[in-house]
Amino acid sequence: MRTMAREIAGCEGATVTVSGWVHRVRELGAISFVLLRDRSGIVQLVYQEKVGFTLESVITVQGEVAANQKAPGGYEVHVSSSEVLAPAEPDLPLAVNQDLDGVSLDAILDHRLVSLRNPRIRRIFVVQSAILKHFAAYLRTRDFTEIKSSKLIGTGTEGGTGLFQVAYFEDKVYLAQSPQFYKQALVASGMERVFEVGTAYRAEKHDTPRHLNEYVSLDVEVGFIDGEHELMDLEVEILAAVFEGVAADCAEELELFDATLPSRAELQQTPRISHDDARQIASDRLGRRLFEINPEAERALCDWALAEHGVEALFVYGFPRKKRPFYTYPDDSRTRSFDLLFRGLEITTGGKRIHQYAMLLDTLPRFGLTPEGMADYLQIFRYGCPPHGGFAIGLERLTQKILGLQNVKEASLFPRDRRRIRP
Amino acid sequence: MRTMAREIAGCEGATVTVSGWVHRVRELGAISFVLLRDRSGIVQLVYQEKVGFTLESVITVQGEVAANQKAPGGYEVHVSSSEVLAPAEPDLPLAVNQDLDGVSLDAILDHRLVSLRNPRIRRIFVVQSAILKHFAAYLRTRDFTEIKSSKLIGTGTEGGTGLFQVAYFEDKVYLAQSPQFYKQALVASGMERVFEVGTAYRAEKHDTPRHLNEYVSLDVEVGFIDGEHELMDLEVEILAAVFEGVAADCAEELELFDATLPSRAELQQTPRISHDDARQIASDRLGRRLFEINPEAERALCDWALAEHGVEALFVYGFPRKKRPFYTYPDDSRTRSFDLLFRGLEITTGGKRIHQYAMLLDTLPRFGLTPEGMADYLQIFRYGCPPHGGFAIGLERLTQKILGLQNVKEASLFPRDRRRIRP
């Protein structure tokens, strides 16, 4: 029966079995101190001999637990027997047991299978797992159904650019940029409220700290809404539930990253600013006239929201029609759409969608689309679709901003970018 | 404030707003009875006039709730005002309000955006959503971390056949057949216990009732196991939790499909039979000598398990080495691997994996692989990997078998097969 490192404190005087990775070795004369790492934490092992372990070797050990104020957690294991389950080669390309602050992101990602052993890096993904848990759990309390749609599509709903092509037997298909088409179809089918957690693909060539070519999209779509403000209300509730859940499950991780999260009350103060006003506010703060809300403006707007409303987040609504996909519900030259900016970064795009068949038929030609080309999509609306809308949250961006990471790639286990296709 | 169909029974005498789809219209002189469908169920509306609704139009209605023993659920709404939110065209390609038993699967899938409106079909995916919920929930209670790995890979871990090629900028990559490489990497990284819910791809040309070219794989991988029987124990516990959860959340759906599920006690009786014994049992039951466990044998074995052990499931372990991928832990000419057959179908493949670097280096050439070609994969083991193993459950197959569907494609929202790439 294995005892986890975290449980050792309750086992003084008992003989236990612990297993894990050799995190650090320190030899003091004939005594060796080995820090053993398992998924729960680190425990000190004491050997009355020199040990020949290479770092990262996997071992399993029996011994008696004794108090020692100098040991991590205040207890250590005096080893009586010890076995190497898998020896490690001595040529680690990166330090697992040290801070990697001085190491380039490229080196960390090139050696991803080693860098993920670093406890600080691994814990990014413990937090990400908690985000996934609480996102789904909250939506289930609101009667949402989880869906899994195909990632192989005939054409892009966002227009034809930015798609990766797949050779599918004799056909050419594409990797879906979003489950937009499918989540709307399922609202219209009578599910009314759906969410999906799935990969999404953008064949865009920019290589920036905010882009991934493959990412996980947390998609939400809701029927029978009046307008986009209900969607913003829902997103605030989702984020409040996720932040509370992460704070409860990952207190240690948040402390490790020196991360704090807005409270529910703070999130509920998130201002909602029209696109025009947002441009004005950003222009004022940056001291020059902006024509669009670029990354610099996103940062300025979040600074403004923190100063004026006590929360590093804001919704920008009323985007111009030409900046939004064809399916966005129009409002004169504007749209019933929004972005959520959080800590200087857009983490969500959403809005009300066109649900009337006649309006869609009118709209397609304005975007250079034809009813024939969009026949599958149009069938959703031909047979009665309720007013609806939705949004998508980028999982890696949300993880990044929760933990204060510099680059979104740090929040992807195996990021794919312009040049990176492995490991 | 909208009232759901399911809540009407508690509202006698009250004026309510209900919204949904026109499921059926019956006119009796100057009175019209309309069945309105929403995500929760069906409610009868009574109009003192002829209504011009086409089926599937989306409407919202106010009216007073009155008891009527002849109405579904015993209550109906006497309409005082009514608005059409989205009219439906009258040329529905499939009946939404009737049993589709006589309709071909091809027609159902060709018109997927309409057939999903059929309440019986839609409810397949309500059950699927519950499976997703309870699979993840159970594993989280066992300290598993949810991961999201890349679906774009440089080479296949299962060998190079059966991969879909993706044009990735100047490179060629492939759609992953499984997250095998990544889930092993994360066990080795120190997460120890991981699960993933993600799409998987097989570019296989067969078009059968048991195959999909894109499916959702419920992947599990666990470190520090002694052998494959611990994995079977874990899978029994997962399925018991999923079945109990589905029974609790989806009682109506199970009744609609006349489906029953094995109890925890029954599942714990699941026999474990060696591959040799399984061939013998199937040969005996089918009255001829079998050389492999084909679909017919899978059915015969499940019949045997039900007759002998009271559960329509069995584990087959000890598959021959040449029938398993290179990473499977060997046991002379056999392997420490297993399948789970359930109700006549293989729904899981799993096993212990090779964790020793030296053993892997020895094994690669036997499978026509080179250390250079598998360099990324080998790095997992070069630096210490615990004994581990895992398995994958096909979400669509599990859904199919829970509900007793004839074809696995019925359990995929938007199936992709040899010829089907839309909608």
Image (spheres, coloured by chain):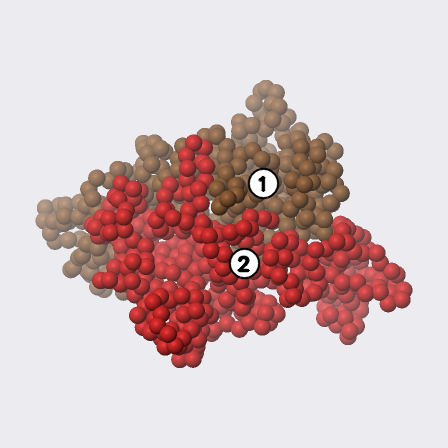
Chain colours: A red, B brown
Q: Quadrant of residue A294?
A: bottom left
Which residue type carries mark 1? Thr
Check the image and name the residue furthest to the front.
Answer: A288
The picture places residue B161, in percent across and down from the top left corner, at: 56, 33
Give SS at disc 2: helix
Q: Residue at x 22, y 57 (%)?
A: B60
The picture places residue B156, in percent across and down from the top left corner, at: 58, 39
The picture places residue A235, in percent across and down from the top left corner, at: 39, 65
Residue matched to label 1: B155
Could you tell me which chain the residue with mark 2 belongs to?
A
Q: Residue at x 48, y 63 (%)?
A: A398
Q: Nearer the viewer, residue A292 or B281?
A: A292
Q: Specify the label residue A409 is tagged with.
A: 2
Q: Residue at x 70, y 65 (%)?
A: A98
Could you tell me which chain the residue with mark 1 belongs to?
B
Check the image and name the residue furthest to the right.
Answer: A30
Q: Is residue B394 visible?
A: no
Which residue type carries mark 2? Lys
Q: Residue at x 27, y 40 (%)?
A: A372
Give SS at disc 1: loop
The quadrant in which the N terminus of chain A is found is bottom right
